[in-house]
Every structure is written in structure tokens, then in C-alpha cells.
Amino acid sequence: MRSFFGATHIRALGAFAAITLIVGLCLRLTLFAVYNDDFGWRFPQLCKALFFGAINDLFSLVFVLIVPSILVLPFNVRFFTAKLGGAYLYFIIFVFAFFISFAAVFEYLFWGAIHSRFNFIALDYMTNGASFIDDAFKIAAFITALTIATISAALFVFGANRLFRLKALKGAPLFGKTRLALFWIHCAIAVLAFLFYSPFAIDANRAFTELAHNGIYELFYANRAKSVDYYAFYPTLPKEEASAIAINETKSKNDRFLLDGSNNFRKITEPKDREISPNIVVVIANGLDKKLLNEYAPNISGYMQEGLSFPRMHASGVGVLRTIEAFSLSIPAIAGDSIVKRSKYRLFSVASIFENRGYARQFIYGGYGYYDNLGGFFSLNGYEVIDRDAFAKENRTFAFGGKQSDEDLFAEAIAQADRRYIANRRFHQTLLASSIKPPYNYPFGRIDVAPKTSREGATRYFDYAFGRFIDAARAKPWFDDTIFVVISDRSLAAKSDSPRLAEYETIAFFYAPKLIEPRQINALCSQIDIAPTLFGLLGWGYESRFFGRDLANASDKDARAFVATNTHLAYAAANGDFVILRPTKKADLTNAARRRAIAVYQTAFDLFNENRLKE
């Protein structure tokens, strides 16, 4: 064979493609044979799944072959016909076949646990270092996967040598510029496939559709879609029953729901006898650990004692995006990535209520607004986004890792508040502070702990910066008419398979010396309850889609908290019940606490997935 592109390069890349297609076929046949309870020996559907599976595998090759292209195309034919070049080629074939086979073994194990090809759940496990394989089976599974992958890789190298005879091939040379052009064409096709290709759904039976998918492509897709279909992986209740239970779990004493037949989950909160309309400044302290509070954050501890605090507050999810989501939308964590990352349209949020009251709304962040779609989320929801690029020059004194210091953040917030006060506008600010994150950097000389040394030092610096912020605000004419809300995220390392209630304990308090008497609300709660409690304190009446309760008007015996990872959804009740919904669809539906958990998480998914959270 004499090819314009050089037979050696084409045959080499063909070897990589053949490995991918063969492993894909073998995996589908193995899944069908071993897990046949999912398929019921339906051979016509199997043939359809194999056919469309081959098509999906061919599309996935545009991603899978990028690395082999990088390793093969830089070299000319003469290199591969030499002994060293031949050894190099067989080595990369071996490594490629090893990883493809290794991934196939774990897809087999993943199917046994989740009954699905790789998806966001698998991606979340990989990202968080957790495993879907039982602990007692991990070592044996890993050794088995290594053994199968090694044997398969050796067989593929032998087959490549026998069938393709790479060293003996000759053909027209593939010149350097042509090889480079071929690589960039390949990359362009990969980008187009990533943007526009969707795997074929071939059967009403989800198992056969999953069988036809390509697991490696699904990981790429999961990283883009960031979603999990609740109904495919979690236990469910009839929708009307779930909605009724969810309403009961989200009502305070002064709430009622509009039952207009549209199932829109419209909560009406009645106004109280006395309303106030102060400015609201929300400070989200990314990384502030409750355990370090007393020793390293004396200012925060003091303000908490002087305000309204919640000793049994729990983070709704892992990381600052879940905290933003819980406060802004008052919704429990939905399986998949945070709504902050996924939001593409305006949702009903606290901003909607502030807007109806004529408040100016700002999100102020010392980093870049495009990070994690923060700017997009807040902008869509009616906030003016002020990131580090929009800070006044005098408020850009110290930067680290693409973020301004918390001192700069608070100085910018003071300046923006002054402008709104002068313009006679009530204002609501959401500030995202981020100094308590690696590399723990801050201006030298501010505190007695050197920068970039420890989380404890960064906590002390944040406390210092926040103390200066309150002192500066105290000198302003708007201070006495302002409530400061401080919220921390759950910043401990996450384990995707085991939410524990104690690990989600976090900080939340309201501070306004002229407006709020010092006290504590000791009810079990989570961050979705902060916004309804704040509006209850203001005495406002409003319509919402909030799942949280006004803790001042909720019964302690009915208190509950929702805590979750991206894939494991947990519910804690005041009587000590604690249940976790795992993505296995298996659950004891006779358990009352589990039914309440299912109802709330299922209803929250329905509202978001069906676009019923839109304003």
C-alpha cells in the first residue's frame, strides 16, 4: 500500500483505533452476558446497541486519538523503520492499550454498582478520590484490573506486529508541515464533535441506551454537562406525593403554598406586623473553619456573640459554590455540579426579592468573574458584578493567585456602599472573600503569622481584614441601618461516598448592633434556611420558590438539615435520623425520614430540570 499520508502513520493510528473499537465491543458483550438481568436476553436490541455503540466509538476516536497523534505524527517514516523507532511505537501501543483496557475493567465494575457507563457520578468519584467499589474489594479489584490490562496490552502489541507489520511498511513520506496540518485538522474535528455531537439514544430501555454509549466520551460530556438525572439513579416517589411532602418540609408558620394546578411550588410568605428595610451586606467567607474560630478569629467570634447566630448551622454542600447556591436560591444541593456553574437563565433568588423592594444589588469579588461562572450566575440574576478588574485603583494594593486581598475587597465594598448611600439607594451586597485558601497569601506585616505558611495564619488575616471592615463601616452614616450576614462554606476535604453531619458544621450569623438583639437560634438547620430567616427578621412578605424555613417561625421538633456532596444527598432530622440517598436507586421506602429526603431532593431536581425555578 502506498499512501500520500505515509502508510506507517496511517497504520499506526489505525492500530490505536482498532484497540479502542475492539475493547468497546468486548466490554458491551461482557456487560450483556454478565448483567443480563438489566437486558433480559433481548438479542435484537443487543444488535442495535452494538451497531450504534460502534458509531459512538467512532465518534469518540476523535478524542481518544489526540494523544496517539501527538506521539506518532512528529516522526517521519525512517524513524519508525529503525530499531529504536519500532520499539518506541510498540511501547506507546502497549501503554495506550493498557489504559484503554484498564478503563474498561473499571467501567465493568462501575456498571455493577451504578448500572451505567461512566458519567458525572464516576467523574465526581475520580475528582474526590472516593470509590464506588466496596472497601474490602478495592485491592482485589485493582490487582485484577492491572492483570487484565497488562495481558490485553501485550496481546494488542503482538496483534499489531502480526497484522500491521509497522516496521516493514513503506509509502510516500508524510512531510512535517503535512503532519502538523493533519494534527490541527484532527483537533478541529474534536472540538466540533465535543460541541455538537450527542450520543445516540437507541431504546426506551435505559440499559440498552447506556450499553450503546462510550464511557470515555461520557466522561468528557459529564465534565461539560455537569448533571445527573435524578430519576435514573436515585429512589423516587410519585411526583404529587413528593411535592406534598416537600411542601410540608419547607413551610414555616407564616407560609402558605399556591395550589394552582401548575405544580410550580409557589410559596407565599405573609408579612409581619412590623417591616424594616435596612441595607444587607452578605460576606461569604470561603475557607473559614468553625474549629479555628475562637483561637484565630477573635473579631468574628465577638461579632457572632453580639448578633443573631446559629450554632447548629450546616453547609448544604461542599465548597463555596454550594454556599452561594444555598443562600441565593434557598434550595438543597441537586445531584451533579452546583447550579452556579450550570445556570443559563435567570432564576428566582434573593435578588428577585431585593429588586422588588428597589434595592441596588452588587456581587463584589476579588478574583475574576468568569471563574466558576460566578460572574455569569450573579449577572443573570440581576446583580452588578464587580470583580478585580473593576476595583478602583486605590483598592488594588495586594494581589495573589489572580485575586485581590480581602482588605482590597472590603475597601471596594465600602466605596460602593458610599455611592449607593449618596444616591439614596438601599443596597444589597454579596462579597466573596477568599484569602483563607491556598496559598494562604496576604500582605506582610498585618498579623503575627507570616504569609503563605498556614491556614491558621490566613484565618487570622481574614479576621483582621473583617475587623477593619466593620470599623470602617461603623464610621459611615449607613452603618446603623445595615445588617451584616456572615456565612462560611464547608471547606473540609470531601469524601464523595460518606457525608457526615458533623463535618458540615459551619458559621452563620447576622450582625447589626442597632437592629438585632444578641441571641442564638439553636435549631438544627442548613444554609438554605438563611435567606428565609433573614427576610423573616425584616418582616417582609414575598412570593418565592424557597425550600428553606424562617427558623424564628419553625418548630424545633420539626427542624432538619440538608447536607450533600455532588452525588450523595443526605437528610438529618431533629430526632437524630440521618439518611443518605446514594445513586443506586435502592432504598427502604418505608422509612419516614428517607421518604422526606427523597421528596425534597426529587422536587428540587424537578423544579430545576423542568425550568420551573425561572423567575
Image (cartoon, grey):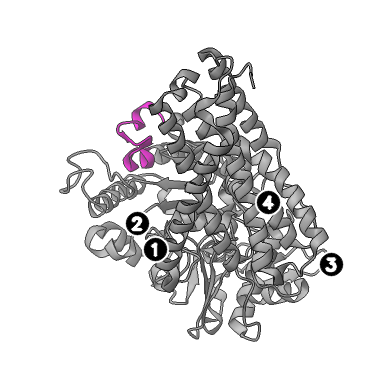
Residue occupying image coordinates x 46% and y 25%: 80
Q: Residue furthest left?
A: 448
Point out the tag, 2 or 3, that comes first from the N-terminus.
3
Magenta stretch encompasses residue 395: yes
How far apart are the two marked residues, 3 and 1, measured between alpha carbons?
39 Å
Point out the tag, 4 or 1, that comes first from the N-terminus.
4
Task: Report the disc number at residue 188.
Answer: none
- Residue type at the position of mark 4: His
- Per the image, the residue denoted by label 1 is 507
**Residue 259: % across, % down:** 80, 70
Q: Nearer the viewer, mark 4 or mark 3?
A: 4
Point out the tag, 4 or 2, that comes first from the N-terminus.
4
How far apart are the two marked residues, 2 and 3, measured between alpha carbons?
44 Å
**Residue 459: % across, % down:** 28, 53
Mark 1 and 2 residues: CB-CB less than 8 Å, in contact? Answer: yes
- Per the image, the residue denoted by label 3 is 261
Point out the tag, 3 or 1, that comes first from the N-terminus.
3
How far apart are the two marked residues, 4 and 3, measured between alpha carbons?
38 Å
Q: Taking 489 as reference, is 383 above or below it?
A: above
SS at circle 4: loop
Point out the tag, 1 or 2, that comes first from the N-terminus.
2
Task: Report the disc number at residue 213.
Answer: 4
Horizontal side of 584 relative to 507 (left or right) equals right
Mark 1: give few (<14), some (14-19) or many (20+) Cα within 10 Å. Answer: many
Mark 4: give few (<14), some (14-19) or many (20+) Cα within 10 Å. Answer: many
- Residue type at the position of mark 3: Gly
- Residue type at the position of mark 2: Leu
SS at circle 1: loop
